[in-house]
């Protein structure tokens, strides 16, 4: 799964999210880094913010993505 596909999946499943996803080791690698900004994170703990992203990715977290280094933030 490409970084672009992962970003699109996050943005389509997490309200008003902006996601920047890059491969951590090269274009065909399943180790990714992502920065996700969404108002849905407002008032949520860091763990809950990450859970929202994992939920947006669904089964891809266990089948297509081996590792995800995640940074989350609100628009402010």
Image (cartoon, rainbow, N blue to C red):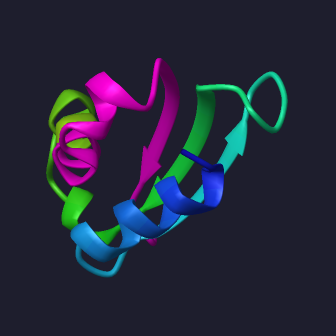
- Whether 26 is among the magenta residues is no
Q: Which of the image's four quarters has the C terminus?
A: bottom left
Q: Which residues are magenta?
A: 52-76
**Residue, x 70% and y 26% (percent of image)?**
29
* Residue 23 placement, left or right of 73: right
* Residue 39 placement, left or right of 27: left
**Residue 12's quadrant in the figure?**
bottom left
Relative to the observer, which residue lies in front, 4 or 11? 4
Furthest-right residue in view? Answer: 26
**Position in image of residue 69 (x %, y %):** 54, 25
**Position in image of residue 52 (x %, y %):** 19, 47
Q: Which of the image's four quarters has the N terminus?
A: top right
**Residue, x 39% and y 71% (percent of image)?**
11
- Whether 56 is among the magenta residues is yes
Furthest-bottom residue in view? Answer: 16
**Residue 41's quadrant in the figure?**
bottom left
* Residue 21 placement, left or right of 16: right
Q: Is residue 41 above or below residue 18?
A: above
């Amino acid at each position: 799964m490409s970084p672009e596909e992962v970003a699109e999946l996050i943005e389509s499943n997490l309200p008003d999210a902006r996601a920047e996803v890059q491969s951590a080791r090269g274009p065909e690698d399943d180790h990714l880094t992502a920065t996700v900004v969404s108002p849905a994170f407002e008032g949520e703990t860091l763990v809950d913010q990450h859970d929202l992203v994992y939920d947006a990715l669904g089964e891809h977290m266990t089948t297509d993505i081996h590792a995800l280094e995640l940074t989350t933030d609100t628009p402010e």
